[in-house]
Amino acid sequence: MKEIHELIAVDTTSRDSNLALIENVVKKLDAYGISSQLIHNEEGTKANLLATIPAADGSVQGGIVLSGHTDVVPVDGQNWSSDPFDAQVRGDKLYGRGTCDMKGYLGVILAKLDQLTSAELAEPIHLALSYDEEVGCVGAVSLVQKIVDDGLAPRGAFVGEPSSMRAIRGHKSMNVFRAEFNGVAAHSSLPSEGVNAISYALRFANFVEEVSAELRTSGPRDEAFIEPTTTMNVNKFDAGIAVNTIPSEAVVYFEYRSLAVVDRDALTARFREKAAELEAEMRAQNPACSVSVQQQAGAPGLDTAPGEEVVALAAACGAIATDEKVTYGTEAGLFSAAGIPTVVCGPGDIAQAHAPDEFIELEQIVACESFIDSLIAQLSS
């Protein structure tokens, strides 16, 4: 578990850089003769890592991707029993930020580098580590694109999000938006001289709730999910500066998680159309007004067919077969959208992720180690 401890000791909260962790991983890979490619964000403060352990014949095309994210959620305001960045074993559990989500999985892979590089692989294994998954699968977009651009053409991928080592074939999409309303400020005693941004933002928020209710009552359903319909929420609202001032600005934050059968582009277009309608009303009062809707994050859902090779491979490696689908989003949808059949399978229970005193049961680490050992055996010639 040394590798897991080392990963957790590096604070990679999403708001901060992950480069210290990535550099440590590069050194470990270098020690085994594995070259790495880094794909940085625009600011150069974060990076994805892509590395390939070639087949015995030197081939780097095809094979399987082992994917995971390097960032973790904040510990701010959480009551921890121990230092969250100093992993500790207590009883049959390992505690620390990221033990479950998902440095436990990454640590197991790094601990297996000796076996991975010494095996007579019949096909390559690609390691894909991303940044900023926790803020909307941001880094994985360029990471998956790099895999495609390099022509690696893997036949499948495993994303190691905590699934209690179940082979998860489906989850919903994730879509996060910011709607900004710019009105005209005025003294509250002279409302006709201003345009109240809050009033229009509230109408937009109410529209989000109306669409949510529509999809919940008459939209498509998938009973494999705990929440069988597309879900949608207004989650944050920023507006106003004083009770005696007509507010000139208001911002609505909302998100939706859609079933695979839902047309995300069409659904998103409904909100843009409503925003344009409200903007026209505001500009009729004052042409200086404006409304904008920006998508801050998004990732497609996952709906891998049960007959895909990667599903059978997961089972052969010891993953628990299931028809259950999970409510949380992952980077798996991005791999799937790129034509790479993908299964979510990793150690730990999602119920422990993001929580104070986050932990992973030690037996889950052992199960993940067995999975990687079996994968090496399955892919060896």
Image: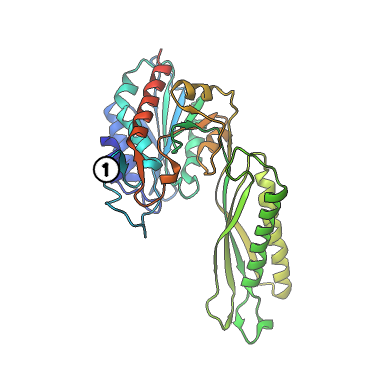
**Residue 9 relative to residue 280: left or right:** left
**Residue 196 relative to residue 33: left or right:** right
Q: Position of residue 279 (x, y in %)?
A: 69, 66
Q: Which residue is mark 1?
A: 90
* Residue 339 image-quadrant placement: top right
**Residue 327 relative to residue 24: left or right:** right
Give 186 or 345, whichever is nearer the viewer: 345
Q: How is the image coloured?
A: rainbow
Q: Position of residue 238 (x, y in %)?
A: 54, 67
User: Residue at point 61% right, 67% down?
Assistant: 181
User: Count of labels shown?
Assistant: 1
Q: Position of residue 379 (x, y in %)?
A: 43, 18
Q: Quadrant of the C terminus?
A: top left
The correct choice, above or below, for 213 with respect to 48 in the image is below
Looking at the image, the residue that sits furthest to the front is 91
Looking at the image, the residue that sits furthest to the bottom is 189
The correct choice, above or below, for 276 with respect to 88 in the image is below
Q: Quadrant of the N terminus?
A: top left
| Label 1 CA crowd tier, 10 Å (few <14, some 14–19, many 20+) | few
| Amino acid bearing label 1 | Arg
Give 360 or 67, whichever is nearer the viewer: 360
Tell me if residue 62 can be seen. Answer: no
Q: Position of residue 139 (x, y in %)?
A: 46, 43
User: Residue at point 44% right, 38% down?
Assistant: 162
**Residue 300 relative to residue 116: left or right:** right
User: Residue at point 59% right, 45% down?
Assistant: 227
For numbered disc 1, what is the local secondary structure?
strand
* Residue 27 image-quadrant placement: top left
The correct choice, above or below, for 277 with respect to 116 in the image is below
Tell me if residue 7 can be seen. Answer: yes
